[in-house]
Image (cartoon, rainbow, N blue to C red):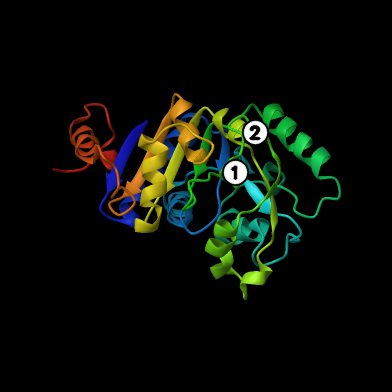
Amino acid sequence: MQIYIFDSYEDLSTAAAAATADTLNLKPDSVLGLATGSTPLGLYRELIRMHREEGLDFSRVTTFNLDEYVGLPKTHPQSYHFFMNRNFFRHINILPQNTYVPAGTTNNHKAFCDWYENRIKESGGIDIQILGIGTDGHIAFNEPTSSLGSRTRIKTLSKQTRDDNSRFFEKPGDVPVYAITMGVGTILEARRIFLIATGAAKAVAVAGAIEGPVSSMNTGSALQLHQDVVVFLDNEAAGKLKLIDYYHWIQENEPDAPEVLRKQP
């Protein structure tokens, strides 16, 4: 893993967007795996700015989202379809037919999940997968004890995840119990993975994912098995890392790192 630690959320988001844009400029028909929630919003805002001000082109890009709540229609304000359109897709020149978000209202979850997996493969696989991490270490909606070889499927959400997400709903009981999610095995097939985490509430989960044992109790720890993972953290999210001084030293001295990723001593 490459660990980069930043003094602010804005700096972190700028760095993650610059790294994403580098891939899009080299491969205009890239396939992106996208995440929802508050963590990637800064990344999306910076990509939108780069599109508007610097001509970053999304016209040939294909996207696949990690997950969606079961039972919420696309028009529901808390559906991930709605989130992506409001916060990203409508602001760039991506073709709507090239954006894929799991269908929360499908009547045949198994058939849909198989189709979603096949569609990713037919598109050439994911070039960059954007990830956040839950306070219990889950990536996508792969809750603790999820198989590290799991594929896209329907998943029951834990009480902790539902409590964490209740701030987005009018009342806690409105949070769906189930979601369709890419599996850990699906995520690990991406060519490159960007993990983004901010805030002290994520520090224990981040430390477990980066420095802890590989375990289904923290599905983020499966990223240790991937050959190309870049982790973008703010100081608070990095607060429980045992080797934080080492990561800072690398970030300050890495000879080939782009300037935006360097931490000035």
Left or right of 208 on screen, residue 143: right
What x and y, as percent, mark residue 226?
47, 26
At a point 73% along the width and 64% down the height, the residue shown is: 75
At a point 67% along the width and 52% down the height, the residue shown is: 68
Q: Tell which residue pokes out farthest to the right in this image.
A: 107
> Toward which corner of the image does residue 119 lie, by quadrant?
top right
Q: Is residue 188 above or below residue 233?
A: above
Residue 15 appears in the figure: no
Q: Disc 2 marks which amino acid?
A: Ser
Q: Could you tell me which secondary element the residue under label 1 belongs to? A: loop
What x and y, as percent, mark residue 37?
53, 57
Q: Which mark is residue 156?
A: none
User: Could you say which is closer to the camera, residue 160 or residue 96?
Assistant: 160
Q: Which mark is residue 150?
A: 2
What x and y, as percent, mark residue 258?
29, 34
At a point 21% along the width and 34% down the height, the residue shown is: 246
Residue 39 appears in the figure: yes
At a point 29% along the width and 40% down the height, the residue shown is: 261
Q: Disc 1 marks which amino acid?
A: Asn
Q: Quadrant of the N terminus?
A: top left
| Callout 2 touching callout 1 (CB < 8 Å) | yes
Q: Which mark is residue 142?
A: 1
User: Could you say which is closer to the camera, residue 183 or residue 8?
Assistant: 183
Q: Quadrant of the C terminus?
A: top left
